Image (cartoon, grey):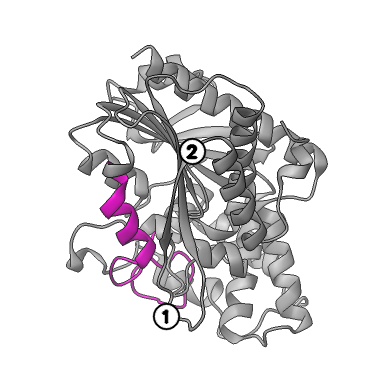
Amino acid sequence: MLNPLDLFSPSYEVARRRFRDAARAAGATLEQHPVDTGEAGGDLTIDVATVGGREPSWAVVVSSGVHGVEGFFGSAIQLAWLSGQTAGEPPPGDGAVVLIHAVNPYGFARLRRTNEQNVDLNRNFLDTADAYTGAPDGYETLDPFLNPASPPSPFEPFRLKALWHIRRHGLPALKDAVAGGQYRFPRGLFFGGHGPASSTRIMRQHLAGWLGGAPRAMHVDLHSGLGAHGRYRLLLEESAPSPNVEWYRDTFGSDVVEPLATAGGTSYAATGTLGGWALTHLGDTRYRFVCAEVGTHSILRVLGALRAENRAHVFGRPGSGAHQRAKAELLECFCPRSDRWRARVIEQGLAIIERAVRSQRIG
């Protein structure tokens, strides 16, 4: 396998080329699904590589880049797994491993967490048109703080303002109000859209088919930005009373598995998630899903980076110093430059995939 530090690509275009090359070298079946962003001359695709049989008895799905800029780290883990296949690691046997690369290629390419319409794709998987409405209690009150109608400024006391809101509302309540998904403020953070995005439609249309009819599947969706630096949690779409929670703990370890809505936990309640949709709609398959969330920097730094980048994108001048600083900070907050962090997350990502594969092989 390649040196872990060499697996991280400098751009979406390079990451996609390397993913395609590695998939072909591993003998994978490769698909490309263009994403319609409405931009002339755009060449953005969701790429899917399948290693294994055509009629598998089980499947493991590994998706990256639902939150575009997080694709840098997710793509590196997928490339690491593929390079292991070309180095002679045993193939899946009677199963299949499906790698979905860059679910949000626009955000990956433009250093945004959201897509071309400022949509957070992990808040966009809703079933009905009238579900794309409203906002959590408290978001409207926080809107002037979260989404100022001006470019970012290095002189603004963001941290002090954030700490004031945390003291007033409490961090858990603030996380739910801010990040749960809102459908009223199109230029605001965590906007879930007014309808299904192009990437969402592609995933809905093809995900079942990518499983190849497998009767059981384990889906690992790679994310970064929440939690302790360089440590991961496997966030479930199922709450603690679910009979499946023990299966996840037995498979991956009770110390890393976090059921939905765990008090004081890493995650928060969110609407329109990919995992929630998959568990609801892939009823013909025994489907299991984890959001593998790797920590980077403090929650205040990550929120500050999201806020500054959004302001720079909406109100800033492309190419300006403020615009470039905001993009660089966002990238650091979702794919840190630290060699130690990068080496560690590759090791962890491969271990998660290995355990997922093992769990499906034994049924």
Identity, as a three-letter code, of the amino acid under mark 2 = Ala
Task: Give the magenta-colored segment's residue range.
Answer: 180-208
Q: What is the magenta segment's predominant secondary structure?
A: loop
193 within the magenta span? yes
Query: What residue do we see at 67% from left, 29% from top?
Result: 347
Identity, as a three-letter code, of the amino acid under mark 1 = Gly
315 within the magenta span? no
Query: What residue do we see at 42% from left, 65% from top?
Result: 34
Secondary structure of residue under mark 1 = loop
Q: Quadrant of the C terminus?
A: top left
Quarter holding residue 249:
top left
Percent from the top left, x then y, of residue 355?
50, 20
In this image, 165 relative to 270: left or right?
Answer: right
The residue that label 1 is drawn on is 38
Q: Which numbered disc, 2 or 1, marks the residue closer to the eye?
A: 2
The reply to whether residue 225 is in sight is no
Percent from the top left, x then y, of residue 45?
47, 62
The reply to whether residue 19 is in sight is yes
Density class for disc 2 (Cα within 10 Å; few <14, some 14-19, many ≥20) is many
The residue that label 2 is drawn on is 28
Residue nearest the viewer, comparing 133 with 168:
133
Density class for disc 1 (Cα within 10 Å; few <14, some 14-19, many ≥20) is few
In this image, 230 relative to 130: left or right?
Answer: right
